[in-house]
Structure formats: structure tokens, C-alpha cells
């Protein structure tokens, strides 16, 4: 076993322990929490180690990095795209990512629906910043219902639920609590949007407490970039 393999094994075990403890504390079964390993900037050799450990959900932020990785690794990996979307990259992203966590514009949804050869899972990214902070991505809360309503007619998109990032300077517990309330309202109108993607290495316990079903963890498993 290499030093790098041992490091990843130990980090992964620690993260899984944290996930389990956070879920139990929230009276939730740990199996409800889907762990996505954020592999951006890390070499394919690290992903091969993760694959040998049984991991199949990997997240990338840039098409330029995700596409070649997806092309060189086993086909049973489930790829998640979570970066800000560029319209010119959508066709390529759709060719390798099964789930997109950062949909926040109807124009992108229309194009994605047109180019998809099979249904693509999407999370609608919500901007929790007050006032809204477009540079971080996400649809403003006041525009969320209109976007969700518009997505209902796009048959090649499977709307999974909401995604958000805790704003800088705000306690994650408060941000994710607001997100949980928004998600509850969304589910009342769109029951199929039952999943919640939030929480990263520094705040995923708070996200699990707020009901996160998908957490995106990178540095706690793979180390600092």
C-alpha cells in the first residue's frame, strides 16, 4: 500500500465517521446522505484509489478537467458537475456528467434539454446571499419558483431538488436552516424535488442537520490543493 493510498483511506474513514455522527444526531439514517468526492485539481491516480475503495460518485467544477477524467476512468462512475455553467461548455458537460448541481438559468436549461440524449439530473442552485451575489452563482430566492415552474415542461431534465453554498460571513447553520425552509416550500409544490445538495468539507455536519441528501467533500478526503 502506498503512502497516498493510506492517507486517503484514513481521511475517508474519518469523513464517514463524521457523516454517521452528524446523521445520528439529526435523527436521520446515515444512508440518506450521499457522499460526492470533489476531485477537482487532483490527479486521476487519486480517483483510481477512490474507485478501488468502492467510491463511485465524483464531482468536478470544470469541464476541461472533468471530461478527460471521465473518459479515462471506468464507465460505472457517476459524475457530478458543480461549477458555474458556461453555455458554450454545456454540450461537453452533458456528454460526461450525469448530474448537474448548478443550474440557475432557464436559457441553460433549454439548451441542456435540447442536447441531452437521455434525461439529465439537475439541481437548481439557489443564491442564499442577501443581497444576491451573482458572481457566486445561483438564482435569487424571489426568482426560484418561476424557474422551477418553467423547468416542468423540459422532459430531458429530471429536477432533483435544490443546491446552495453557505454565503461567506454567515454561520452555515443559519444559511442551511434558511435553505431547508425554502426546500420545504418547494417540495410542497414540486414533490419530486426531494433532494438537497449542500455542505462541503468545512460545514457538511451543519448541512446534514438541515436535511442535506448530497454533500460535496473534497479537501477533507484528498487534502489541501
Image (cartoon, grey):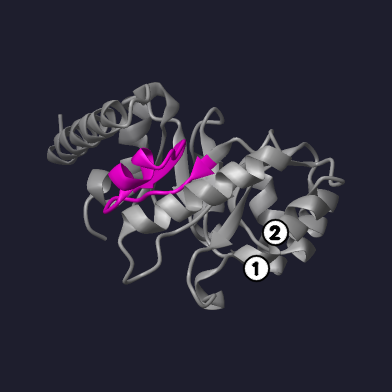
Looking at the image, residue 177 lies above or below residue 28: below
Residue 151 location (% of width, % of height): 79, 50
Q: Nearer the viewer, residue 180 or 164?
A: 180
Q: What is the crowding at mark 2: few (fewer than 14 residues within 10 Å), some, or many (at least 20)?
A: some
Residue at 31% across, 46% down = 206
SS category of the residue bearing label 1:
loop
Q: Is residue 97 visible?
A: no
Q: Magenta part of the protein: which range?
A: 196-217
Q: Residue at x 30, y 34 (%)?
A: 49
Residue that mark 2 sits on:
90
Q: Is residue 127 left or right of residue 106?
A: left
Whether residue 59 is situated above or below residue 1 in the rendered picture: below
The answer to whether residue 46 of the structure is visible from this angle is yes
Q: How many marks?
A: 2
Q: Are marks 1 and 2 in contact (CB under 8 Å)?
A: yes
* Side of 137 where 109 appears, left or right: right
Q: In screen coordinates, is 24 left or right of 96? A: left
Specify whether residue 199 is painted magenta: yes
Residue at the disc numbered 1: 86
Q: Which residue sits at x=65%, y=62%?
A: 104
Of residues 23 and 14, the one nearer the viewer is 23
Give the x, y percent position of residue 89.
Answer: 67, 63
207 relative to 76 in the view: left or right: left
In the figure, 78 relative to 66: above or below? above
Residue closest to the far left? 3
Q: Position of residue 67 (x, y in %)?
A: 56, 51
Amino acid at each position: 500500500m502506498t503512502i497516498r493510498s493510506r492517507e486517503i483511506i484514513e481521511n475517508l474513514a474519518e469523513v464517514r465517521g463524521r457523516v454517521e455522527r452528524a446523521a445520528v444526531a439529526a435523527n436521520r439514517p446515515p444512508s440518506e446522505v450521499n457522499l460526492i468526492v470533489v476531485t477537482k485539481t487532483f490527479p486521476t491516480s487519486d480517483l483510481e484509489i477512490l474507485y478501488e475503495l468502492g467510491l463511485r460518485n465524483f464531482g468536478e467544477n470544470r469541464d476541461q478537467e472533468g471530461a478527460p477524467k471521465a473518459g479515462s476512468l471506468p464507465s460505472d462512475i457517476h459524475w457530478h458537475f458543480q461549477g458555474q455553467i458556461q453555455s458554450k461548455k454545456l454540450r461537453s458537460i452533458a456528454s460526461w456528467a450525469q448530474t448537474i448541481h448548478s443550474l440557475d438559468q432557464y436559457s441553460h436549461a433549454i439548451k441542456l434539454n435540447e442536447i441531452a440524449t437521455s434525461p439529465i439530473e439537475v439541481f437548481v442552485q439557489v443564491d442564499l446571499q442577501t443581497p444576491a451575489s451573482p458572481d457566486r452563482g445561483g438564482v435569487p430566492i424571489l426568482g426560484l419558483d418561476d424557474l422551477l415552474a418553467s423547468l416542468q415542461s423540459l422532459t430531458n431534465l429530471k429536477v432533483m431538488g435544490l443546491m446552495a453554498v453557505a454565503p461567506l460571513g454567515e454561520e452555515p447553520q443559519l444559511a442551511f436552516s434558511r435553505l431547508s425552509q425554502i426546500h420545504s416550500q418547494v417540495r410542497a409544490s414540486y414533490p419530486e424535488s426531494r433532494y438537497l445538495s449542500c455542505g462541503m468539507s468545512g460545514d457538511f455536519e451543519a448541512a446534514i442537520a438541515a436535511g442535506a441528501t448530497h454533500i460535496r467533500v473534497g479537501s477533507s478526503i484528498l487534502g489541501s490543493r
